[in-house]
């Protein structure tokens, strides 16, 4: 490293002090950073003051911004797909062999419960619908709340209630001294910061969000699934992950609208009409007569103006030649903030070759797998544990509750992704299988299939083809005998 001359060092020391050379550039206060306003408040204080506005603006983007809706659609397709995250039981007997009967029974019962009929208290959502709805809620509101309702009136005595996050009132706060419990934004926590219960307003939120005179309902932590991505230690409530790019979305939405309107005006060739000395011409605005000269602009039409007027056109020079490049630059920044590929967000495959597209797809799939693992851990597994407990206590099964530990062997199969290059990927998988680097079960699971189902289907196919072969042989023999 090239050392600074002593004269330069002494100059900086005299002017700024001895520590200026080793300080953080981003921590300095100067005229270039004077508009960088920050506070040292806690994350919960920031959430309490900013969350209502962030929610309102994010919901507005859902209603009016095509790019944000494309982002939500990409999440739905890539995290859950058409079949959602499915249950696969791996119950084993004491000798290590799979308990196929118990596996089939629990999988079938879970499939029955997770249907439209039984899954939610509203009886109109399957578990896949729940997965998609809570993900959209997490992205727009920053969090989701699900109540696990024991004793509900359905075939399993269990259902889920999806609660609007706004019902957990941000204004419910009780400060405690010492080791006592406190309430932060509707969440009661102990001295360690662990949640104990949640305080919800009781109003029917399908009509209004006015909770001024609402009663408070408290649910223990075991009754509620509170899902949000924790970014800071001690964070109690969630906030929309799109918070960092909402400003950009709003600006490009407004810019795009202005560009469209200006282009439309330019296409109509609008202008103004004038008179040589500014006098009033018959047919124009006249206070005495009340007449007003009006011009309706339509494509491919020509207007007749009163005598003595002159019409001067003006051109807005739209569409702007740099519009596309500017939008691309802004959307790349937005895509980075959302951690997705610009090409997929913008549905733009220009200047993309196979290698770059494959690299982007593979990187993005890792992002979706992280989301799948998050939903398995924070949503599906807690719901399954509660459901299994009630199922083993019900009259719908003969499986003993005393062996609940055995029946908790649940694994989950997220949606699979198609190969980017089918031939090369298939050859690589065959090579890894032959070299014992990966098992056939894992290869099948990567395709989103249950290995047991695949084996059963192959057996069924073999029986079918064997029957067809025998039938063909008998037909051939009969035809040969007829010819003889």
Image (cartoon, rainbow, N blue to C red):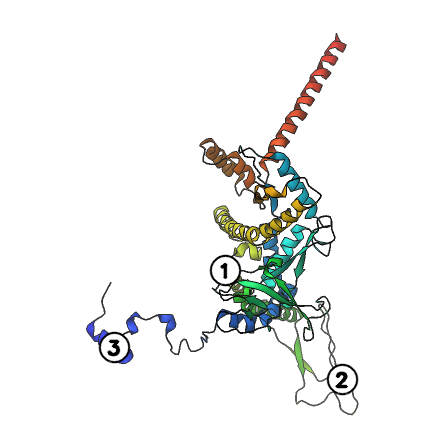
Q: CA distance from mark 3 to mark 2?
A: 74 Å
Quick one: SS at disc 3? helix
> Of all residues shown, which one is farthest toward the left?
6
Report the side of 2 relative to 293 (left or right): left
Q: Quadrant of residue 17?
A: bottom left
Q: Quadrant of residue 133?
A: bottom right
First reached walking from the N terminus: tag 3 or tag 1: 3
Quick one: SS at disc 1? helix
**Residue 69 visible (yes or no):** no
Label of residue 336 in the image: 1
- State if disc 1 and disc 2 touch (CB < 8 Å): no
Q: Position of residue 400 (x, y in %)?
A: 63, 41
* Residue denoted by label 2: 292
Which of discs 3 and 1 lies nearer the camera? The answer is 3
Residue at the spot x=22%, y=67% of the render? 3
Q: CA distance from mark 3 to mark 1?
A: 40 Å
Residue at the spot x=61%, y=34% of the render? 100
Q: Quadrant of the N terminus?
A: bottom left
Q: CA distance from mark 2 to mark 1?
A: 54 Å
First reached walking from the N terminus: tag 2 or tag 1: 2
For the residue pair 307 and 458, the one nearer the viewer reads as: 458
* Residue denoted by label 3: 13
């Amino acid at each position: 490293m090239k050392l600074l001359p002593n004269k330069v060092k002494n100059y900086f020391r005299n002017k700024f002090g001895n520590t200026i050379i080793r300080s953080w550039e981003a921590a300095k206060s100067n005229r270039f950073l004077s508009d960088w306003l920050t506070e040292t408040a806690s994350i919960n204080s920031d959430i309490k003051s900013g969350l209502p506005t962030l929610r309102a603006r994010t919901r507005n983007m859902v209603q009016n911004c095509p790019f944000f809706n494309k982002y939500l659609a990409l999440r739905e397709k890539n995290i859950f797909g058409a079949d959602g995250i499915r249950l696969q039981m791996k119950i084993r007997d004491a000798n290590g062999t799979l308990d196929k009967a118990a596996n089939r029974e629990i999988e079938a019962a879970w499939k029955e419960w997770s249907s439209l009929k039984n899954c939610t208290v509203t009886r109109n959502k399957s578990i896949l619908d729940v997965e998609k709805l809570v993900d959209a809620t997490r992205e727009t509101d920053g969090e989701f709340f699900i109540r696990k309702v024991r004793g509900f009136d359905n075939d399993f005595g269990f259902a889920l209630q999806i609660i609007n996050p706004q019902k957990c009132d941000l204004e419910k706060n009780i400060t405690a001294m010492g080791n006592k419990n406190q309430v932060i934004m509707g969440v009661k926590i102990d001295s360690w910061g662990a949640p104990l219960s949640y305080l919800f307003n009781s109003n029917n939120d399908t009509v209004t969000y006015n909770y001024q005179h609402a009663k408070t309902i408290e649910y223990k932590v075991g009754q509620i699934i509170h899902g949000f991505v924790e970014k800071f230690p001690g964070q109690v409530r969630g906030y929309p992950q799109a918070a960092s790019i909402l400003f950009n979305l709003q600006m490009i939405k407004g810019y795009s609208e202005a560009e469209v309107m200006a282009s439309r005006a330019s296409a109509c060739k609008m202008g103004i009409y004038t008179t040589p000395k500014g006098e009033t011409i018959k047919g124009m605005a006249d206070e005495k007569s009340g007449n007003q000269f009006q011009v309706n602009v339509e494509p491919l039409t020509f207007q007749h103006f009163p005598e003595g007027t002159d019409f001067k056109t003006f051109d807005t020079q739209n569409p702007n030649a740099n519009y596309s490049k500017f939008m691309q630059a802004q959307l790349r920044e937005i895509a980075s903030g959302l951690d997705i590929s610009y090409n997929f967000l913008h549905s733009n495959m220009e200047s993309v070759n196979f290698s770059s597209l494959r690299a982007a797809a593979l990187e993005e799939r890792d992002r979706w797998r992280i989301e799948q693992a998050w939903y398995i851990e924070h949503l599906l597994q807690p719901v399954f544990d509660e459901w299994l407990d009630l199922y083993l206590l019900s009259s719908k099964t003969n499986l003993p509750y005393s062996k609940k530990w055995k029946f908790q062997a649940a694994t989950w199969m997220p949606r699979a992704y198609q190969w980017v290059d089918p031939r090369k990927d298939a050859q690589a998988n065959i090579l890894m299988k032959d070299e014992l680097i990966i098992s056939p079960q894992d290869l099948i699971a990567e395709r989103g299939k249950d290995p047991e189902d695949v084996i059963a289907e192959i057996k069924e196919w073999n029986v079918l083809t064997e029957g067809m072969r025998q039938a063909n042989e008998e037909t051939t023999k009969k035809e040969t005998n007829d010819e003889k």
